Amino acid sequence: MKGNPISARMIPSIFTLANLLFGFLALILVIEEDYTTAAAMILLSVLMDSLDGKVARRLSVSSDFGKELDSLSDLVSFGVAPAILTYQAIMHSLQPDYVRYIGLSIAAIFALCGAVRLARFNMLNITTHFVGVPITFAGGFIALLMFFRTMLPWYVYAISMAFLAFLMVSTIKVSKLGK
């Protein structure tokens, strides 16, 4: 094989796949009831997500493939993983049952709104600002809250997730960092 085995075009995708890997590990850690480490994995996903785009722009290798892979990874790491983490760590044992089901509904809505937000982001192709709160922020914020789960009441998580879900699909303009 001639040349470098890893081309410059592949490097951003390595960061994106690391984002997805950390999101996957967060889900496994939720199953194992290690909620603090699961939250840390989501925060590592935030770091990887911030690096993949920067690296792609720096190397001038942005691509439609990278954009789609990034969105799929983001849905797992910042939509599904925080929703399942919050449901399992905070809302799963709530009583009475109807409160638990409300928590489950909010967690599902959070993940679904994240998917809608990512699909809209890919279609709009706006470079000057975000429309709605980015899923990376929403999922990262929920993961950060998880470090305070012994200090905060359960409804803080429910309200935060519902509010962030709304903000993700809202039409508010959010400035991009560095713009």
Image (tube, helix red, strand yellow):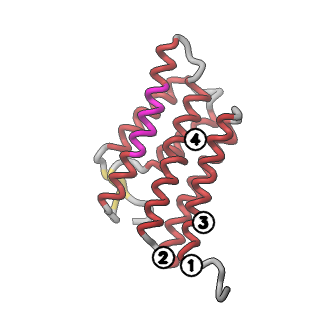
Viewed as shown, does residue 12 lie left or right of 124?
Answer: right
| Nearer-N-terminus badge (1/2) | 1
Q: Give the quadrant of residue 32.
A: top right
Graded by Cα atoms within 10 Å as few (under 14), some (14 to 19) or many (20 or more), the crowding at tag 4 reads: many
Separation of residues labelled 1 and 3 (CA atoms): 10 Å
**Label 3 sits on what residue type?**
Ile
Q: Which residues are magenta?
A: 104-115
Contact (Cβ within 8 Å) of mark 3 with mark 4? no
**Label 1 sits on what residue type?**
Ala
Residue where numbered disc 1 is placed: 8
Graded by Cα atoms within 10 Å as few (under 14), some (14 to 19) or many (20 or more), the crowding at tag 1 reads: some
| Nearer-N-terminus badge (1/3) | 1
Of circles 1 and 4, the one toward us is 1
Residue where numbered disc 2 is placed: 61
- Magenta: main secondary structure equals helix
Number of the label disc, if any, that sits on residue 143: 4
Residue where numbered disc 3 is placed: 14
